[in-house]
Amino acid sequence: QVQLVESGGGLVQAGGSLRLSCATSGFIFSTYTMVWYRQAPGKQREPVATITPLDYTYYADSVKGRFTISRDNAKNTVYLQMNSLKPEDTAVYYCHPQRMTYWGKGTLVTVSS
C-alpha cells in the first residue's frame, strides 16, 4: 500500500524559510522520479520541483533559485527547502511519485506579507 505523508508546513513571514518532508512507503522509492506540487486556493495544482532517480532536478520558473528539492533514498523521503518565501507561495504542497495515481493529504504553507 502506497503511503505519502507530507509535513513541515506552517505560517511564515515573507522572506522566511520552511523545509517540507515527504515520507513514503509501499513502493521502490529510489526508482521513481518524485515531484512536489502545490495548489493555491482557487487554482489548479501545479508542479513546483522534480527530482529524478539520478538526482537531476527541475524547477518551475516561479521558484527557481529559491527552492531546492532533494531526496534520501535510505529514508524513502523527499524534501523541499523553501527560502525567500513570498505570499504567492501560499498553497497546499503535495509530493507525488511520477506515473502513479497516489496522492497524500498535503501540507499547508501560508506566507504572510
Image: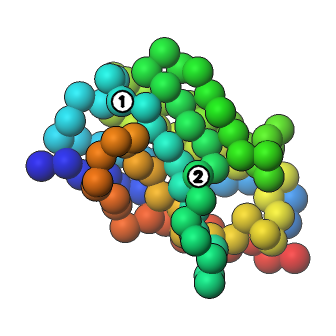
User: Where residue 68 sits in the image (x, y, percent)?
Assistant: 68, 37
Residue at which label 2 appears: 47
Q: Is residue 112 above or below residue 67?
A: below
- 82 and 65: which one is in front? 65
Q: Is residue 24 above or below residue 13?
A: above
Report if residue 9 is visible in the image: no
Q: Is residue 89 left or right of residue 75?
A: right
User: Where residue 38 sits in the image (x, y, percent)?
Assistant: 57, 62
Mark 1 nearby-residue class (10 Å; few <14, some 14–19, many ≥20):
some
Q: Residue at x 79, y 41 (%)?
A: 64
Which amino acid, mark 2?
Pro
Q: CA distance from mark 1 to mark 2?
A: 16 Å
User: Where residue 8 sits in the image (x, y, percent)?
Assistant: 53, 57
Mark 2 nearby-residue class (10 Å; few <14, some 14–19, many ≥20):
some
Which amino acid, mark 1?
Tyr
Q: Is residue 13 left or right of residue 54?
A: right
Q: Residue at x 36, y 30 (%)?
A: 32
The chosen color scheme is rainbow
- 106 and 75: which one is in front? 106
Residue 66 occupies quadrant = top right
User: Where residue 63 sits in the image (x, y, percent)?
Assistant: 77, 48
Q: Residue at x 55, y 65 (%)?
A: 45
Report if residue 2 is visible in the image: yes
Farthest top residue?
A: 54
* Mark 1 vs 2, N-terminal side: 1
Q: Is residue 80 above or below residue 107?
A: above
Res. 32 mark = 1
Residue 106 occupies quadrant = bottom left
- 24 and 61: which one is in front? 61
Q: Residue at x 71, y 46 (%)?
A: 60
**SS label for mark 2:** strand
